[in-house]
Image: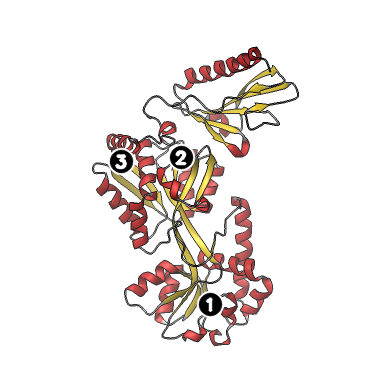
Amino acid sequence: MTVRIRQLVNSLLGVVCSWLMSLSGMLEIYRLQARRKFVMPVKTGIQVRLRTTFKNCLDLGLCRNDGKSQLRVEFTTPELAAEGRSVSIIAVAALAFFTYPAALPAQVKKPVTLSDLVAYTGADREQILSAGAKAEGKVVWYTSLAGSSYKELAQGFEKKYPGIKVDVYRAASNELMARISAEAKARKYLVDTIETTLPLLKSLREDGLLAVYASPHLLKYPAHAKEPAGNGLYYWGVNRESFIGVGYNPNLISASAVPKNFAGLLNPQLRGKMGFTTSDTGVRMMGAILKFKGEEFARRLKAQDVSLHSISGRAMADLAISGEVPISPSIFRDHAMELKGKGAPIDWMPMEAVPTNAGATAIVYQAPHPHGAVLMADFILSPEGQKILENLEFGNPSKDFGFKRWYPEGGLSTAQYDKEATGWQKALRELGRK
């Protein structure tokens, strides 16, 4: 390609980007590698997508499109999106090759908007975030954490950053989904930062409600514990794990009868003593049994005269302690260890694959308190936030606990996971049918 042609194409891109800048006032491009799409959040609330239709891209940024390259600029306002419509501008250049700019020029000013803050990695990041959050006055945090855990995290944040109040809304994941969806539909955005389970976060991502962000703390997290969005940005980072395994009363279940693996659940000594919760905890354990042992094993397990209980995993631990259900494969490790530490007769054993409930932290795309939103995410993912959760017996995704984790929703879309979970739930009901 001649230098002249390169200059013409770059000029075309420059004109379009300059025009977008004048329209929105301020924008930043994020590259979403999976679809070669650039999402540019803007102050006005308009979402701008810069999409290219180039083929055969090479590592050096040179692309060929059989003599034709197309630049498509698509605008979608909330009103148009509700009607499934958008406004597009298409520029076509007849070229053999062209140079595609990899990114915008390096940032030269301090971050102000959410689109600036989520990607800012300067040495003064915390200082900028804390000062901005103090000016905002508060951060609104939605979480599905239960017990004292969310209160202790909020208190830890407020202690570290005086003058910034944490407004917490705690609810189950399905209730959080309903609330956030209603806010988005009404275009009344209240929440800044979310901490909840992966199926909900996947659904929010699919609905376009999550921002992508970078956090210096995520650099130390393993790959499975952060959801990449490209260019060093992420949709979420896993900040706590809860492990589902066999909880039992050591006063009622002998050491020789305690299962060390799934096969151990068939021990004749356990017949009539075992129970499952029918909540997600039991459903996910049933999913692990089907995945790692198969349907025939599940049918054999039915012969153990298993009882089913419409209660939470935490309540199932209480039944093990009371002796009503001496052993259950649907008890969380953190619940058992917390109760054991208080002197209760309960212990816990992992199977060869441990269903893992992961809670992760994300930032809402239209966060009304952008500095507080990013600062809260950083705090939860920081060593200080992790210490609070570990003291409550939550698992740290960066630590090896000596067993194999299994994320039931791993690699699945929301629809795919829902379909799988429906099958596991059906199998669990069959397990308890006499």
Q: Residue at x 52, y 47 (%)?
A: 227
- Amino acid type at circle 1 is Lys
**Is residue 274 visible in the rendered structure shown here?**
yes
State the CA–CA distance, disc 3 to disc 2: 20 Å
Q: Residue 102, how many percent across, how many down?
A: 56, 28
Q: Residue at x 40, y 24 (%)?
A: 108
Would residue 241 be found to the left or right of residue 371 on screen? right
Q: Are marks 3 and 2 in contact (CB under 8 Å)?
A: no
- Amino acid type at circle 2 is Tyr
Q: Residue at x 37, y 55 (%)?
A: 386
Q: Which residue is mark 2?
A: 213
State the CA–CA distance, disc 1 to disc 3: 48 Å
Q: How many marks?
A: 3
Specify the color scheme: secondary structure
Nearest the eye: 105 or 284: 105
Q: Residue 110: which quarter of the image?
A: top left
Mark with earlier residue (3, 2): 3
- Look at the numbered disc 3 and give the secondary structure of its residue: strand
Q: Residue 58, how many percent across, how many down?
A: 66, 31
Assign the N terminus to one quadrant of the image.
top right
Q: Which residue is mark 1?
A: 260
- Amino acid type at circle 3 is Lys
Q: Neighbour class for label 3 at 10 Å: few (<14), some, many (≥20)?
A: many
Q: Which residue is mark 3?
A: 138
